[in-house]
């Protein structure tokens, strides 16, 4: 992966930077919060996309917003880049370090600050895990709806940065639809607050801009979220089919008939086998494709919807239907799906999880083409799919110790993503662009589109110090993003490095 | 995960095991929230995933382990919560065990630390010496502020009142009260028998009332867990061999149906003998036999009918899962069922389960973290004890028992003491 060329001048100043950071974040009871030794830095060299690795210049683990503000002010003054990191679970390399950047670890921001049932809101620090929020309000029968499969570990700050989805976003929306407010630190050290415990806000929808900004606009230090009352009842169904096309039809028919399930997921045979071994959910072994469909709401409504979905599934020739009898069974149905990615680790040393979105109706042909590619690249692929909203997660299995396999897996993934775009979809559903899909951005956006997006970044971070090398295939200096002057077919700044 | 081991390294079966585990790890981070130290510090280096990575780097670089890596391996409790959390099947238990032993072989600790690590384990595992030290330490308690924090923590572990040991660790036979249905060998535990002999007494009373003959097998001593967990593998193996030989002699000459362990930390270790000797031509079959014979007391009780309940007005109980029982042996249901079966009202501790910080000799070697974890656990426990008016905290491991007792007003007892009490035995001492 090509990254911006490290700034030798910054690297030369490493010891002064360390000294300053140590002043801002002093040593705690359990040791240093400024990590400088190579062993310690090594632990931070990659996130959930471990194929790409880079030792950071320094890692700092601040504990307060004031410390972050001082760190950013200092780094902005001398031009040091910043890469923020939550739980390090990004699958697009969003928290991949840079050799000349300070990595800002937010793991110590792990407290829930305020639970306000009257306003259905929770204020939390960004390092708190997604699941902890639902756990904290569960006694009062509330929950936080977006539930990425990594919800047990992924941080809520990271969820905002990536605008994460999850199996239930079909009905309840992505992070952005459940986000009420933010506190964040800009690169110049300013601490700003957006939104609050109420809906809507005056002026531009800045929360919408920050959602999914992948650490390019600021460092999130506090998040206010909408929580929901748990549905009166929720039941999950396992529906098996002998071919993926029929399963795809089933998904389309359910949605088309006006039913909006809480979640609707699809797994293929390989994914079923790998997850069954970990959770023993009782997934059927005799189906090619398994749907998990969850229906939630009042008891009467759920019973009625289950009957309707059963009819649809039977009509399409489903060969396996099982409905959860109780909450424990519903949870175990989901447990397999939620652990599907890492469970693939049981059958392959490495995997590359692709994340693209397609129009639902194109699913059968996309799956057929992915299987053809699997043969072409001689790499196995397991498919896990947020079927309800068209978000596809093929898991390409490879062995990083075999020469050339990683490259083949990357090429395979690239072809899948291009296929997604070809059939009218987009590059990412929820994992973000990061470094992984950066170079494909040009396939979706024109140069002017990309420049326009970067102009927005310039408004927040004019020196381009926040998470550079992610999302955009070409780095532009903000100064040159003004009027583009083309002279004799040549743009100015033709010397700007591309990577 | 990509690995970079040499062919020479790969020829070592232990290194092969390490590499196999690394290949399974996909760096997903699902283990992070299960880890007590990560939950306190929020630092990747203090998480299972971070440790796996640091250890990988240590092995691949083939340099002497650096002090940073050593400190993060040392701070792992080996509570094994991460093993249950791992979807891709990484065997962190044996991974970290080997890392500790590798560090022991390739890293020179400062002399004082070496001395202290050896001394602490020596003391705890030698009953007579332990008793002597505890007596001395009681006198030293008022002086403890003059010692370093680590020594201070050792001294503070001393119970206020010392009981005289009633059962010695030499061969004894406790006959079944009625017609004998089983013959079992009870591991007395080294620290347990000194710190709280009532646990073994209760076990023997209960089992003999259930018509089992209980024997204390001659020659069986420390299980080796404490040495094993600080990387002193060869000592641990020697202790294990002594026990295996002693139990096999008992098995061959007089017959035993099971080896019963009521200290969960020891139980996890003995059940692991099979793994420890899997590449040892002489001992692998023997060790497998011993591991297979070994059961936690709660597993044995589940196979039989408990004696009839003679107690009334049983107090409310809070049950704390010992990590060695919950994660090490996968036992959570049985102790709860038994307590309920004899009439105790059971209250669960809210929130996620985390280690109490005891973890073998961890609370002595890493007192600050152990204290933090203890406080966190007790805050939750005290909260439920107030709302449910529970006055007794039950657990299945002597380490947790001592650790928690040192910070709460609740009476902390072993589960088996309550079962004995409710079915005609004695009330557990304070």
Image (cartoon, coloured by chain):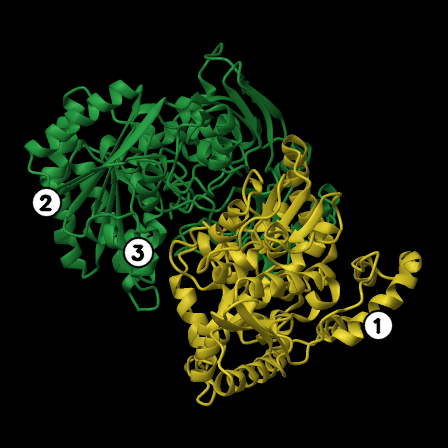
Chain colours: A green, B yellow
* Left or right, residue B257 beside residue B205: left
Subunit bearing disc 2: A
* Left or right, residue A66 beside residue A244: right
Question: Can marks 3 and 2 be said to lie on one chain?
Answer: yes
Q: Is residue B165 visible?
A: yes
In the picture of the structure, the residue carrying the numbered disc 1 is B132
In the picture of the structure, the residue carrying the numbered disc 3 is A277
Q: Is residue A54 visible?
A: no
Quarter occupied by residue A366: top left
In the picture of the structure, the residue carrying the numbered disc 2 is A243
> Crowding at label 2, few (<14), some or many (≥20) Cα neighbours within 10 Å?
some
Q: Separation of disc 1 and disc 2 at Cα?
A: 73 Å
Front one among B137 and B394:
B394
> Crowding at label 1, few (<14), some or many (≥20) Cα neighbours within 10 Å?
few
**Residue B347's x, y, as percent?**
57, 39
Q: Separation of disc 3 and disc 2 at Cα?
A: 22 Å
* Left or right, residue A387 beside residue A179: left
């Amino acid at each position: 992966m090509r990254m911006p060329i490290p700034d030798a001048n910054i690297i030369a100043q490493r010891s002064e930077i360390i000294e300053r950071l140590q002043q801002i974040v002093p040593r705690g009871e359990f040791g240093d919060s400024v990590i400088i030794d190579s062993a310690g830095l090594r632990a931070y060299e990659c996130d959930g996309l471990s194929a790409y690795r880079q030792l950071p210049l320094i890692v700092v683990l601040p504990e307060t917003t004031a410390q972050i503000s001082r760190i950013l002010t200092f780094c902005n003054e001398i031009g040091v880049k910043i890469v923020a990191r939550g739980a390090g679970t990004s699958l697009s390399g969003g928290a991949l370090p840079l050799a000349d950047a300070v990595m800002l670890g937010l793991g110590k921001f792990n407290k829930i600050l305020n639970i306000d049932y009257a306003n259905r809101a929770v204020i939390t620090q960004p390092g708190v895990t997604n699941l902890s929020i639902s756990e904290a309000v569960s006694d009062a029968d509330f929950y936080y709806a977006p539930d990425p499969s990594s919800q047990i570990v992924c941080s809520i700050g990271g969820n905002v940065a990536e605008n994460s989805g999850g199996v239930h976003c079909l009905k309840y929306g992505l992070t952005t639809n459940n986000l009420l407010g933010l506190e964040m630190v800009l690169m110049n050290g300013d601490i700003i607050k957006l939104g609050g415990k109420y809906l809507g806000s005056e002026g531009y929808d800045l929360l919408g801009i920050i959602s999914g900004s992948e650490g390019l606009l600021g460092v999130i230090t506090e998040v206010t979220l909408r929580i929901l009352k748990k549905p009166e009842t929720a039941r999950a169904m396992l529906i098996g089919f002998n071919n993926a096309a029929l399963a795809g039809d089933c998904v389309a028919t359910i949605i088309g008939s006006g039913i909006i399930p809480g979640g609707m997921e699809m797994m293929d045979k390989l994914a079923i086998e790998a997850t069954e071994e970990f959770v023993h959910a009782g997934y059927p072994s005799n189906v090619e494709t398994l749907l998990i469909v969850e229906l939630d709401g009042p008891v009467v409504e759920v019973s009625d919807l289950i009957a309707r979905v059963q009819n649809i599934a039977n009509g399409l020739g489903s060969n396996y239907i099982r409905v959860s009898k109780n909450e424990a069974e519903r949870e175990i149905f989901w447990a397999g799906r939620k652990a599907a990615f890492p469970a693939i680790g049981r059958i392959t040393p490495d995997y590359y999880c692709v994340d693209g979105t397609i129009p639902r109706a194109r699913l059968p042909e996309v799956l057929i083409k992915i299987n053809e590619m699997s043969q072409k690249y001689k790499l196995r692929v397991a498919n896990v799919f947020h079927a309800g909203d068209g978000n596809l997660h093929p898991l390409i299995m490879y062995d990083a110790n075999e020469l050339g396999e990683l490259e083949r897996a990357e090429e395979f993934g690239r072809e899948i993503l291009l296929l997604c775009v070809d059939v009218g979809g987009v590059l990412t559903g929820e994992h973000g662009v990061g470094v992984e899909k950066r170079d494909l951005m040009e396939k979706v956006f024109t140069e002017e589109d990309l420049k326009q997006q970067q102009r927005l970044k310039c408004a927040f971070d004019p020196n381009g110090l926040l998470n550079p090398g992610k999302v955009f295939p070409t780095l532009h200096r903000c100064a040159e993003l003004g009027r583009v002057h083309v002279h004799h077919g040549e743009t100015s700044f033709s010397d700007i490095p591309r990577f | 995960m990509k690995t970079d081991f040499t062919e020479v390294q790969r020829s070592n079966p232990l290194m092969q095991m390490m590499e196999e585990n690394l290949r399974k790890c996909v760096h997903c981070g699902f283990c992070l929230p299960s880890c007590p130290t990560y939950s306190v510090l929020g630092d990747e280096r203090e998480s299972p995933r971070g440790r796996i990575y640091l250890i990988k780097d240590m092995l691949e670089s083939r340099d002497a382990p650096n002090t940073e890596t050593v400190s993060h391996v040392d701070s792992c409790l080996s509570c094994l919560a991460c093993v249950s959390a791992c979807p891709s099947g990484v065997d962190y238990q044996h991974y970290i065990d080997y890392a500790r032993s590798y560090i022991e072989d390739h890293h020179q600790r400062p002399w004082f630390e070496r001395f202290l690590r050896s001394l602490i384990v020596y003391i705890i595992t030698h009953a007579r010496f332990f008793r002597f030290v505890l007596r001395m330490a009681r006198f030293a308690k008022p002086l403890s502020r003059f010692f370093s924090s680590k020594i201070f923590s050792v001294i503070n572990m001393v119970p206020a009142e010392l009981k005289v040991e009633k059962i010695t660790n030499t061969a004894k036979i406790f006959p079944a009260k009625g017609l004998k249905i089983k013959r079992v060998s009870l591991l007395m535990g080294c620290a347990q028998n000194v710190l709280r002999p009532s646990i073994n007494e209760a076990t023997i009373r209960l089992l003999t009332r259930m018509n089992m003959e209980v024997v204390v097998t001659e020659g069986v001593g420390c299980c080796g867990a404490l040495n094993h967990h600080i990387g002193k593998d060869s000592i641990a193996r020697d202790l294990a061999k002594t026990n295996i030989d002693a139990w096999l002699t008992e098995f061959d000459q007089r017959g035993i149906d099971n080896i019963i362990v009521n200290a969960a930390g020891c139980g996890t270790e003995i059940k692991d003998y099979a793994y420890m000797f899997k590449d040892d031509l002489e001992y692998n079959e023997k060790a497998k036999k011993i591991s297979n014979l070994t059961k936690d007391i709660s597993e044995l009780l589940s196979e039989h009918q408990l004696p009839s309940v003679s107690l009334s007005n049983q107090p409310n109980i809070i049950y704390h899962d010992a990590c060695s029982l919950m994660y090490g042996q996968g036992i959570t249901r049985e102790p709860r069922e038994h307590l309920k079966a004899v009439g105790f009202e059971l209250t669960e501790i809210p929130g996620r389960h985390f280690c109490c910080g005891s973890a073998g000799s961890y609370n002595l070697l890493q007192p600050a973290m152990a204290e933090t974890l203890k406080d966190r656990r007790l805050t939750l426990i005290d909260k439920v004890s107030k709302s449910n008016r529970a006055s007794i905290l039950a657990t299945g491991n002597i380490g947790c028992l001592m650790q928690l007792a040192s910070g709460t007003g609740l009476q902390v007892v072993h589960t088996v003491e309550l079962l004995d009490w409710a079915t005609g035995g004695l009330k557990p001492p304070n």
